[in-house]
Amino acid sequence: MIYETAPAKINFTLDTLFKRDDGYHEIEMIMTTIDLNDRLSFQKRKDKKIVVDIEHNYVPNDHKNLAYRAAKLMVETYNIKEGITITIDKDIPVSAGLAGGSADAAATMRGMNRLFRLGKSLDDLSALGIQIGTDIPFCIYNKTAVCTGRGEKVTFLDKPPSAWVVLAKPDLGISSPDVFKALNLNEQHVVYNDLCKQALKTNDYQLLCKSLSNRLEPISISMHPEIKKLKDNMLQCGADGALMSGSGPTVYALAQKERQAKNIFNAVNGCCNEVYLVRLLG
Ligand code: ATP
């Protein structure tokens, strides 16, 4: 049996630059890893089946599971002759903007690389992973990086300064395709990618907090104003910075002191069912 942890990610920044001829958006986003994890285990099977063992109301256990799709891609690409059982123990909230499904897919690729002794590099797996989803190349490494192109170009940045992260997922669903459809590239919204890179390079926590910015945030807020309320609440309770991650709806707050983080946690705990207090890993 092989084990892998699949950590969630948050966006420090997310910018959409233009719509490409292939229909995807060219993006530039800075992401980091947090210690909120799914846990996966992998076991060979004598038959050739890919079996996903997960008990979760909102996550499929069939070919629609991103871990299944990753496993199928690995089997086809590397000509694997055996089957596999993938067991997923899920802690990352689903459809949250935290790349939980991508984290599972990436962990599956790393796990199968070890289980079947394929000897592939993380760079090989990352290049392959983009076939399944935008966030998978990043999730292969679980560091801090700027991702460009469709998400396939991953350039590592320095680890962020240590900080607490309070995450709160409002009880609502947001479809990423709907958010991208509503995106008007002519509307201005400043995203501080350069400032964020500088903050990471100089280990400047205050600057990092100032640079948090997400091109999709105003769109998701226009669809669900409670996201803004949650963000404002976190800032009023002493967050050093707060931002919606990905296409939402999860909003996170950064805090350097534990007491400050606990205050924010307690303030939002009553209004959202899914609230977490974790650390930046980077
Ligand atoms: P991203 O930030 O990459 O957009 P997300 O956090 O918004 O991702 P996910 O939790 O990855 O969203 O799930 C999105 C959809 O994918 C859900 O409809 C879910 O049912 C489906 N899905 C498929 N496989 C998985 C998986 N292993 N874990 C979670 N969701 C999965």
Image (cartoon, rainbow, N blue to C red):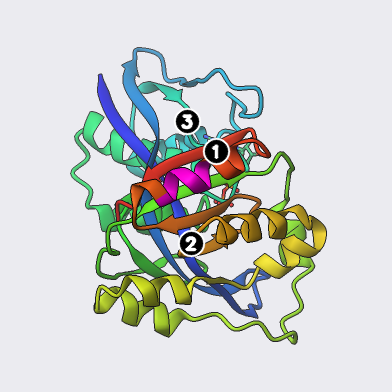
Residue 263 within the segment the image draws in magenta: yes
**Ligand 1 falls in which quarter?**
top right
Mark with earlier residue (2, 1): 2
Residue 11 numbered tag: 2
Q: Relative to 217, is 280 above or below?
A: above
Where are the magenta residues, as a range?
260-265
Residue visible at 71% across and 65% down? 180
Q: Which amino acid lies under the numbered mark 1 shown in the image of this protein?
A: Val
Q: Which amino acid lies under the numbered mark 2 shown in the image of this protein?
A: Asn
Majority secondary structure of the magenta segment?
Answer: helix
Crowding at label 1, few (<14), some or many (≥20) Cα neighbours within 10 Å?
Answer: many
- Camera-side mark, 2 or 1: 1
Q: Is residue 227 left or right of residue 209?
A: right
Residue visible at 64% across and 61% down? 232
Instruction: List the residue tagged with mark 1.
Output: 275
Whether tag 2 and tag 1 are in contact, CB under 8 A, the answer is: no
Q: Which of 248 and 110 lies nearest the eye of the viewer?
A: 248
Instruction: List the residue tagged with mark 3.
Output: 91
Residue 230, horizontal then vertical, whole percent: 66, 53
- Camera-side mark, 3 or 1: 1
Residue 23, horizontal then vertical, whole percent: 68, 70
